[in-house]
Image (cartoon, helix red, strand yellow):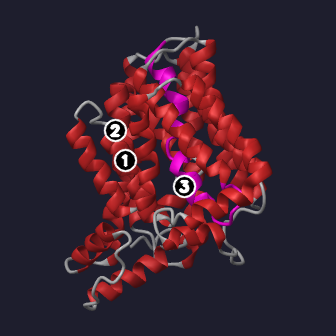
Amino acid sequence: MNTIVPLEYYYPLYINLCLFLVLFTVLHTLILKMDESKNIGFINVSGYILLFFLIFYLGQRPIHRIFGDTVNYNFAFKKYQSGAEILNFDDYGWDVFMKTLSNWMSIHTFLTICTFIYIYPLYKISIFLFDKYWYYAFIMFIISFSFWTYGVNGVRNGAATSIFLWGLCFHKKKVIMGLFFLWATLFHKTLYLPIFAFILTYFYNNPKVYFKGWLFCIPLSLVMGGVWITLFASLGFADDRLSGYLTSESEAGTFTSTGFRWDFLFHSAFAVFAGWYFIYKKHFEDKFYFQLLNTYLVCNGFWILIIKANYSNRFAYLSWFMMGLIIIYPLLKQQFFKKQHFMIGKVMVAYFSFTYFMYYIYYA
């Protein structure tokens, strides 16, 4: 367990480390060409240090309510260590995973393994898609607004979405990809939504239609928000517990939605604008990118429909976990600008600014 960093500085250390890396990366994008050996060396060394540091920094965190549901995971883990049987069959794979490991290790080793499952796939899909430039995509994942929350609070959800991304590395090997998707749903049933959306893109993959659908979800939510919440809750989306997130009252001090969240819609629109800009203004053609973008639009559109529900952030993450990848993908695949390396740096600053602003200004 990490006892060196005081609890009140745990998140500030992370977010200011991100600030340092973003600014230092921007400096490199300004003075070095993207394919220069000095730059390649910097991004690889920095990337691997960041990868290993974050796995152990998050994984070895203290058990404290400041880390949200970490205390609940600890409670469940201790129960399994004491011989408790599995009683919850909603996400059976997760409970089998936790109970099995509880017989062999401490809670901090377990949390470190969970953090590995959460972070390693972000590296895996980054290096799969972008090879020696993987660092730029990886750091976009790390500096995302929702990254920290789903590493220490919504641990199961975060692990499941990362497993989904890991599965996308095998999109040309459908059987292996399907096994990863199954693994993801066994950890968290809400992954049926992005899996369904991604499979849908094999049958129809025209971004223009998905863009229109996403836009149409906004007035539908404004006018009929309560109808969609009631509808999806009555359908028992995923399980009773998750349906409860749609209809239950928020608890004091929790991160919840209060009315139509224009701030989070603005945040979600980052990826939407990036996709629209590169496809229709820069004429970027890439089938797999279309699939990723359209999956994002479907999942984010679903969230917009139920945006007024308390705890709707639980469903927002079903699209947000892809946001950094959607934004950076075209810039690492095709030359669009004369000083594209510096443009990548500026995009990273703009994207991280929302995360930094929300912590130091909005929530403060």
Q: Which residue was labeled with disc 2?
A: 168
Q: Which residues lie in the magenta part?
A: 306-334
Label drawn at residue 14 = 3
**Front one among 363 and 330:** 330
Rendered image quadrant of residue 342: top right
Residue 227's place in the image compared with 243, above or below, is above
Q: Secondary structure at mark 3?
A: helix
Q: Does the magenta-highlighted stretch encompass residue 105?
A: no
In the rendered image, the quadrant that contains the N terminus is bottom left
Kind of residue indicated by mark 3 = Tyr
Kind of residue indicated by mark 2 = Leu
Q: Position of residue 58 (x, y in %)?
A: 44, 62
Q: Which residue was labeled with disc 1?
A: 164
- The structure residue drawn at horizontal position 31% and vertical position 32%, both measured from the top left corner, is 128
- The structure residue drawn at horizontal position 42% and vertical position 76%, both measured from the top left corner, is 73
Q: Which secondary structure type mostly characterizes the magenta part of the structure?
A: helix
Q: CA distance from mark 3 to mark 1?
A: 25 Å
**Front one among 17 and 230:** 230
Q: Secondary structure at mark 1?
A: helix
Q: Earlier in the sequence, mark 3 or mark 2?
A: 3
Q: Position of residue 11 (x, y in %)?
A: 57, 61
